[in-house]
Image (cartoon, coloured by chain):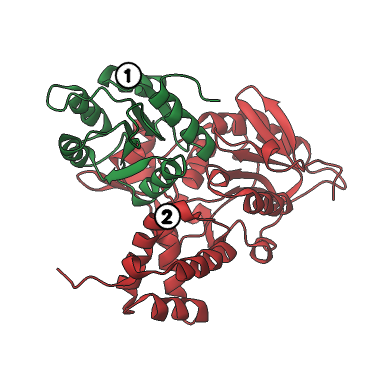
Chain colours: A red, B green
Amino acid sequence: MTIPMVAGAGLSDLDFEKFREYFYKRTGIQFTAAKRYFVDRRIDACIQSSGHRNFGGWFAALRLGDRTDLLQDLINQLTVNETYFLREDYQFDSLLSEVLPRVLAGRGRPGRPAGPVKILSLPCSTGEEPYSIALRLLEEWDQIDHVDVEIHGADIDSAVLDRARLAVYGNRSLQRVPKPWLAKYFTRIDEDRYQLDGGIRDAVTLAQVNVCDTPAMRAVQDFDVIFCRNVLIYFDELSSRRAAENLYGALRAGGFLFLGHSESMSRISPIFTPVRLPEGLVYQRPTGAK
Amino acid sequence: MTMEDGTTATALVVDDAATVRLYHSSLLREAGFDVEEAANGLEAVEAALGTVFDLFVVDVNMPKMDGYACVETLRSDTVGTGAPILMVSTEDRPEDADRAYRAGANLYLVKPVSAKRLARVATMLIAKGVPE
């Protein structure tokens, strides 16, 4: 047993306020005072693994920015990553049957977008979502041999991106993957873990980005479809509006945005047009808009 | 959240993911609950043997003892709680909810659950009625 650090228990209200403001500015995630106890414990873990002796030293180093690993560790501690292959699969049905045909209908003509169809999974967590999209397109989309498709995944958390690159998954993550797909695209590496084949891994481009970081999001452009599921629900009003604007900027005119089942863009911002599809709502960046 | 006897309602949040516990616990605290946490079903059963909880919020997929087994044990003579149990999971198939109800849950919600919704549902389950 190591000697307990003083951090969490000794964190003053002023320190917590400073931390809260800093974390909000960096990530858009707001902790209210009621979350204090839980945030303290996460901060404790970060201080312990950083090698600093107390909050003051750790926080100074964090703000100084020399050690980006400190902020990354903090973000990893405080964000939620839980998913599995083919989660909320009805939205992938919608992608194949409704959204991609509409995207293709808008292409290849003069004045219309050219180049590959670009799909973004943000946040992509440990990779299940972008890889699920890749598998469903390969297995079920009749246009896959005729259309060039780029799939991108992005997340704020570097540790989950590393796991996405490695693409090793356990039974729980894979439980909804059909057996033939498992045999075709995965290699069993031990009793209950499988690795996705290199071909699919290489087909998905992974990058680190925070959806609330407007300057960083300017580099994310020209997407036809974005899946941004189950993240806006954790943001406050201001951050979710900023995220919505950044997603808008990342889409082509006429591009489509999928949100999670319990999320609603209409509550956040009026800039998207809701489109009712048989499998549920999607949000479209209006075609006439710049 | 005050109970009929004037005490503050105490909730147990059971989830193996620390960040999910953080999220659910803080929402319940904001809604006025005292909150304790457990990282798996076994820890939850242990906690419930020592403390009388007014509400349980239980994840499904956890190591050692999963959510279904946990809820069954909480409802069995071993613990015998009559408090409302809310199960929250990423699993969205109808059979997952059926299994939760058979185990003894009062309500099954698919993650993520918004702040407002969790607070309302928790209050409703405690009050056995519809909140304002």
Q: What residue is pinned by disc 2?
A: A164
Quadrant for the N terminus of chain A in the image: bottom left
Q: Is residue B75 above or below residue B47?
A: above
Q: What residue is pinned by disc 1?
A: B101
Mark 2 against mark 1, which lies toward the viewer?
Answer: 1
Kindly identify which chain the residue marked by label 1 belongs to.
Answer: B
Q: Are marks 2 and 1 in contact (CB under 8 Å)?
A: no
Q: Residues within 10 Å of mark 2 (few under 14, many from 20)?
A: many
Dot 1 amino acid type: Tyr
**Residue A115 drawn at (x, y percent):** 72, 51
**Residue B3 drawn at (x, y percent):** 36, 30
Q: Front-most of A15 and B60? A: A15
Residue drawn at (27%, 46%), measured in percent from left and top? Answer: A193
Q: Relative to A103, is A193 on the left or the right?
A: left
Disc on res. A76: none
Residue drawn at (55%, 65%), measured in percent from left and top? Answer: A21
Q: Residues within 10 Å of mark 1 (few under 14, many from 20)?
A: some
Q: Relative to B54, is A233 on the left or the right?
A: right
Dot 2 amino acid type: Ala
Q: Front-most of A63 and A147? A: A63
Do the residues marked 2 and 1 share a common chain?
no
User: In terms of image quadrants, where is residue B95?
Assistant: top left
**Residue B126 drawn at (x, y percent):** 39, 26
The residue tagged with tag 2: helix, strand or loop?
A: helix
